[in-house]
Image: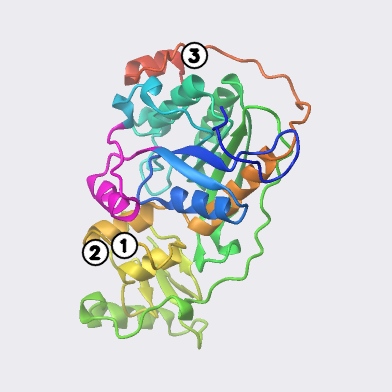
């Protein structure tokens, strides 16, 4: 469904209106919203968020501080019919069920079934397109059957969908963060994935000066890191040191992926100190205008759970460009399936009956 709006930004038979309505599911602190607004701005469009949702209270607080509205809580308790009409559905659905850091329970984990809340909203509201994000391990989970089931579900709902793993490091932020993106269109479109190739913003432009003592690791931890790095490559530029589960310490002129549940000393700047709240947000591509509304622990979790904004901006922008072109003949005939969601929240047992996972 296309929003009413002023003149389109290109004159063709499929041009977009000036104002695009979108919903922000599992919104966290608003990474997708920042990305959508940025992608719209460079195209002379206006993004209007008509619904947001996140169950985390601290994330709601941070989102409200930055956008002036508090997200709805538990999406599983929201009727799909109660969600406002929208053009785009955006959502980084919770990744814990698929991450190699967690127990990898997939659809057996209640959090994994939150994908089906996306599905019931897509079925009821039929937006023109969607953009979803998850950890890259979703691609290989259960020998690829989990992702296969997700793609089958989206196609069964009438969407032409595709996926790709992208690395935020290729989109200007100094963070190696590989995530899978799934995009889908109600009508087949000539969609091209963004290539990246954006020069990386150096850590020197992100790191703060005169960092308070509270961020510094203990002398014992710093010495331990130095010993482990003694015979390895050294850098003149700032680096972020990463200690993996096996105890190996690596150092790069960029950060490994921020993680919400990692040890406080998982990433250390120059092997000496933890990142500040502002540095973590910059690593994820948030502007300095972002208001930090929560304490260090909550903000660290929020940054670790967030999307890398420039990477998402590129994907959303590519979706907008595809929507602005005429539809193309479908590459294959979709077999639409009635999943009998009726728009209502689903219990885990009803989800299993309606959309059983691959064996």
Depth check, mark 1 against mark 2: the one in front is 1
Tell whether 327 sits left or right of 104: right
The residue at the point 45 percent across, 22 percent down is 120
Q: Which region shows up in magenta?
A: 51-74
Local SS, label 3: loop
The residue at the point 34 percent across, 71 percent down is 275
Q: Is residue 195 magenta?
A: no
Judging by the rendered image, the residue that carries numbered circle 1 is 291
Sequence-wise first label, 2 or 3? 2
Measured in 3D between alpha carbons, the distance from the residue under mark 1 to the one under mark 2, in whole angstroms, is: 13 Å
Judging by the rendered image, the residue that carries numbered circle 2 is 296
Local SS, label 1: loop
Q: Residues within 10 Å of mark 2 (few under 14, many from 20)?
A: few
Measured in 3D between alpha carbons, the distance from the residue under mark 2 to the one under mark 3, in whole angstroms, is: 43 Å
Camera-nearest residue between 47 and 100:
47
Q: Residue 359, can we see it? A: no
Residue 289, x across and y down, in percent: 38, 65
Is residue 318 shown above or below 333? below
Residue 49, x across and y down, in percent: 43, 41
Sequence-wise first label, 1 or 2? 1
């Amino acid at each position: 469904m296309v929003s009413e709006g002023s003149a389109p930004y290109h004159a063709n038979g499929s041009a977009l209106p000036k104002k695009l309505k979108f919903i922000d599911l599992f919104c966290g602190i608003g990474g997708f919203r920042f990305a959508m607004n940025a992608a719209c701005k460079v195209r002379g469009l206006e993004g209007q968020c008509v619904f947001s949702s996140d169950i985390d209270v601290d994330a709601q607080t941070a989102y409200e501080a930055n956008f002036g509205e508090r997200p709805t809580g538990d999406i599983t308790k929201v009727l799909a019919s109660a969600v406002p009409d929208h053009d785009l559905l955006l959502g980084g659905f919770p990744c814990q069920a698929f991450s190699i850091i967690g127990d990898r329970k997939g659809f057996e984990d209640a959090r994994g079934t939150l994908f089906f809340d996306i599905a019931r909203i897509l079925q009821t509201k039929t937006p023109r397109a969607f953009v979803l994000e998850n950890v890259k391990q979703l691609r290989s989970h259960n020998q690829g059957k989990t992702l296969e089931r997700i793609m089958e579900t989206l196609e069964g709902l009438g969407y032409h969908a595709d996926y790709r793993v992208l690395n935020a490091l290729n989109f200007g932020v100094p963070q190696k963060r590989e995530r899978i993106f799934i995009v889908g269109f109600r009508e087949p479109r000539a969609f091209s994935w963004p290539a990246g190739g954006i020069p990386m913003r150096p850590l020197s432009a992100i790191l703060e000066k005169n960092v308070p003592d509270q961020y510094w690791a203990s002398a014992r931890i710093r010495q331990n890191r130095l010993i482990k790095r003694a015979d390895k490559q050294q850098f003149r530029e700032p680096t972020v040191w990463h200690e993996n589960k096996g105890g190996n310490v690596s150092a790069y002129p960029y950060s490994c992926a921020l993680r919400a549940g990692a040890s406080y000393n998982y990433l250390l700047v120059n092997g000496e100190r933890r990142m500040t709240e502002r540095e973590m947000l910059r690593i994820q591509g948030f502007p300095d205008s972002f208001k930090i509304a929560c304490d260090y622990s909550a903000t660290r979790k929020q940054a670790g759970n967030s999307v890398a904004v420039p990477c998402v901006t590129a994907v959303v922008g590519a979706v907008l460009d595809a929507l602005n072109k005429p539809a193309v003949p479908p590459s294959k005939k979709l077999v639409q399936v009635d999943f009998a969601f009726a728009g209502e929240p689903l219990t885990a047992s009803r989800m299993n009956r309606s959309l059983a996972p691959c064996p």
